[in-house]
Image (tube, rainbow, N blue to C red):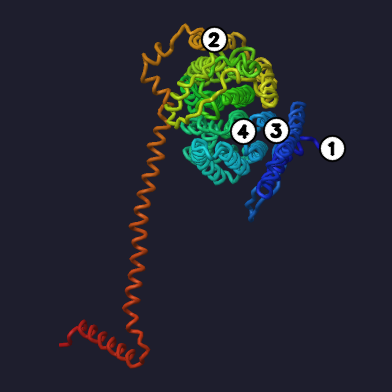
């Protein structure tokens, strides 16, 4: 029986087969397939389950020391030029595959309850299977060219899922925004890939790094060109992983169904960018200036996401900006030359962020019973409060997620985030300080979300507040009174609560795999780095940073408690009224959406109108003039086509006389 690592290529194939069959069924027998929704969902769940089993076996093999596997075949060739394709399975790939398959399985189980009454149930599951297959294919890709193929498939699936409710303007616009912003990054990625191939004649990660190093040392490739190519490739991860300034698509992607929000934020699209930067570490480590840029972008993103999350009232958008901030931490780790720390935080973050998003979906599902199927109301925390008593499983798991992401020991977020901050303290102390402040902000806004949602008094039955929020959102107020009140709130079905409880376990204990004095995770991904870390670890250096991190997180939690639970602090008076400009700046998301609207959206429309003017007046004018000249000359010449030989002879004779006269006039006189 072959080793699981040798048949890892089957991992993305199984979900793909399921997606193809269900997709063809929707095309050929739409009504019949939609009536068999449970059979389809179980089938797709089974396909992903098989992939998960193989992924778990590959991880066990890698933990037990099984050698990495790489199998290639020639996909295309012309003379000496060949394009290899295949798959590679190493410790990093096995960890990522296990993460993706696990989160996908849980999201599918959750979706059975969340999307139960949606008419697009089968279509949603088909998209989920295709999305997960694309991400799995990206993970096992052995070179940049194959990664780019799956990279675009991931982008396509995210477009389909974000715009799943395409009949809603918000969802359709969000899908277009995600597509356009990612095309900007992907264009840079494509240029970078082609440039690196031109410089090294290879798409392989390690061969590219060796080739660039050799070319730079031999002066056959200017340093500035190498830096430009590295930055162009980095544009792809900047967009996919929502790094400043290409982060603007991710919060708007919350217009899609909540399960897909959990999948995008935890294990697929945003993880793809971090994963690619980790794969390209051999290349980026050659140029400290590129690593500085990566760290700088990560730091800005980290602070930006946290600062905007401070003022959000939409539950899902608050979590979305939280993801932006945490992705900034991961990118900071990559820039510090600590990819293991970045991937470790990616894994821990996936567990508690998936749980938080699925928990928010559970809350929204319950809120819709009270305020109706109006996302603006169902997701607004000003209408929530007091849900803990009605939703014990959701509230408990959400609280665990808040503690984990805040970096409170011994939960997972503490170990992974502190490892990043420790590396930043050594490499870029200024960036460490920003990350340190962000840790306090993270604790504050996460517990702000928790207290507003689950504690205090329920405000969902306030009709005046509902109308006020709808009016502020510029939504037409329909004259229908919702009879259901607070008593109709209830816990979500088991299909939605089971994934929450399951994810709560790794959110608590998975951090133990990354003890800085004995990191099992680092030992799996990079044994040499793990050995160096163990030998260089000193408790007197670790404790001050760890204590400081916990201290500032505790301050954030305390302020949130006093402001939103105990109600002893009025932040509206202390901050919003005292610093209205800053509050407005954060509430308007640093005005980045407004800048994009004026500079790019309206600017591109203005440019398009000018191009249209040139096309209609200049290009069309030349074409029309040519047609008129042809028409006029034809109209004139048709009178000379009489069919009479005597007339043609007369014209020839006249022409000869005219030529003789002209040349005779120009001839010099003979004296």
Residue 90 got which mark?
3
Which residue position holds label 4?
268
Count residues near mark 4 (Cα–Cα under 10 Å), then give few for <14, some for 14-19, many for 20+. many
Q: CA distance from mark 2 to mark 4?
A: 31 Å
- Measured as percent of width and height from the top left, residue 441 is found at 50, 16
Q: Residue at 65%, 53% (x, y): give it.
A: 77
Closer to viewer: mark 2 or mark 3:
2
Which residue position holds label 1?
1
Chain-order first, disc 2 or disc 1: 1
Q: CA distance from mark 2 to mark 1?
A: 53 Å
Q: CA distance from mark 4 to mark 3?
A: 19 Å
Chain-order first, disc 4 or disc 1: 1
* Disc 1 secondary structure class: loop
Closer to viewer: mark 4 or mark 1:
4
* Disc 2 secondary structure class: helix
Depth order, front residue of 449/663: 449
Outermost residue on the bottom side: it is: 646
Outermost residue on the left side: it is: 671
Residue 554 got which mark?
2
Q: Residue at 70%, 41% (x, y): give it.
A: 35
Depth order, front residue of 639/306: 639
Evaluate if marks 1 and 3 touch, with contact meaning CB atoms under 8 Å apart: no
Closer to viewer: mark 4 or mark 3:
4
Count residues near mark 3 (Cα–Cα under 10 Å), then give few for <14, some for 14-19, many for 20+. many
Chain-order first, disc 2 or disc 3: 3
Depth order, front residue of 337/476: 476
Quarter of the N terminus within the rendering: top right
The answer to whether residue 230 shows anywhere in this view is no
Q: CA distance from mark 4 to mark 1?
A: 31 Å
Check the image and report above or below for 263 versus 122.
above
């Amino acid at each position: 029986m072959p080793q699981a690592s040798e048949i890892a290529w089957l991992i993305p194939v199984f979900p793909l087969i399921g997606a193809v069959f269900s997709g063809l069924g929707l095309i050929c027998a739409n009504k019949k397939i939609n009536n068999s929704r449970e059979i389809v969902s179980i089938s797709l769940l089974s396909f992903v389950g098989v992939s998960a089993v193989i992924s778990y076996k590959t991880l066990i093999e890698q933990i037990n020391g099984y050698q990495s596997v790489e199998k290639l075949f020639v996909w295309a060739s012309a003379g000496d030029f060949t394009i290899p394709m295949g798959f590679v399975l190493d410790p990093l790939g096995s960890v990522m595959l296990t993460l993706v398959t696990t989160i996908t399985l849980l999201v599918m189980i959750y979706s059975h309850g969340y999307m139960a009454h949606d008419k697009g149930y089968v279509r949603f599951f088909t998209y989920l299977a295709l999305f997960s297959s694309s991400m799995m294919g990206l993970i096992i890709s052995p070179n940049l060219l194959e990664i780019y193929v799956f990279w675009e498939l991931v982008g396509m699936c995210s477009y389909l899922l974000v715009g799943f409710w395409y009949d809603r303007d918000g969802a359709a616009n969000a899908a277009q925004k995600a597509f356009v912003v990612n095309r900007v990054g992907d264009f840079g990625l494509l240029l970078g890939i082609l440039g690196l191939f031109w410089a090294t004649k290879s798409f392989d990660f390690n061969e590219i790094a060796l080739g660039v190093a050799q070319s730079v040392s031999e002066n056959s490739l200017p340093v500035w060109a190498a830096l430009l190519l590295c930055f162009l490739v980095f544009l792809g991860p900047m967009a996919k992983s929502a790094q400043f300034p290409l982060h603007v698509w991710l919060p708007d992607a919350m217009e899609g169904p909540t399960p897909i929000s959990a999948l995008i934020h935890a294990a697929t699209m945003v993880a793809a960018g971090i994963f690619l930067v980790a794969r390209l570490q051999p290349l980026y480590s050659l140029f400290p200036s590129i690593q500085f840029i990566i760290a700088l972008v990560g730091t800005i993103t980290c602070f930006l996401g946290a600062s905007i999350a401070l003022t959000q009232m939409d539950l899902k958008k608050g979590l979305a900006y939280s993801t932006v901030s945490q992705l900034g931490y991961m990118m900071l780790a990559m820039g510090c030359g600590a990819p293991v720390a970045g991937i470790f935080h990616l894994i821990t973050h996936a567990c508690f962020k998936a749980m938080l998003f699925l928990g928010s979906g559970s809350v929204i599902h319950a809120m819709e019973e009270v305020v109706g199927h109006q996302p603006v109301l169902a997701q607004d925390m000003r209408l929530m409060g007091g849900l803990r008593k009605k939703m014990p499983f959701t509230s408990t798991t959400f609280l665990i997620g808040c503690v984990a992401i805040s970096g409170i020991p011994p939960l997972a977020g503490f170990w992974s985030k502190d490892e990043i901050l420790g590396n930043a303290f050594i490499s870029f102390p200024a960036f460490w300080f920003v990350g340190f402040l962000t840790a306090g902000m993270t604790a504050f806004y996460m517990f702000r979300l928790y207290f507003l949602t689950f504690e205090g008094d329920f405000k969902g039955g306030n009709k005046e507040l509902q109308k006020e929020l709808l009016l502020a959102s510029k939504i037409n107020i329909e004259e229908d009174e919702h009879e259901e009140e607070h008593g109709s709130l209830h816990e979500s079905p088991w299909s939605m609560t089971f994934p929450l409880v399951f994810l709560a376990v790794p959110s608590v204990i998975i951090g133990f795999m990354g003890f800085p004095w004995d990191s099992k995770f680092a030992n799996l991904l990079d044994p040499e780095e793990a050995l160096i870390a163990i030998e260089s670890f000193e408790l007197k250096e670790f404790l001050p940073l760890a204590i400081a991190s916990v201290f500032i997180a505790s301050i954030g939690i305390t302020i949130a408690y006093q402001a939103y639970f105990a109600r002893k602090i009025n932040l509206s008076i202390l901050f919003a009224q005292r610093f209205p400009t800053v509050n407005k700046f954060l509430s308007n998301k640093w005005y980045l959406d407004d800048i994009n609207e004026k500079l790019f959206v309206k600017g591109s429309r203005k440019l398009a109108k000018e191009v249209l003017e040139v096309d209609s007046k200049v290009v069309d004018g030349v074409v029309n003039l040519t047609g008129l000249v042809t028409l006029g000359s034809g109209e004139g010449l048709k009178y000379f086509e009489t069919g009479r030989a005597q007339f043609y002879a007369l014209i020839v004779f006249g022409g000869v006389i005219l030529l003789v006269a002209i040349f005779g006039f120009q001839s010099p006189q003979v004296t």
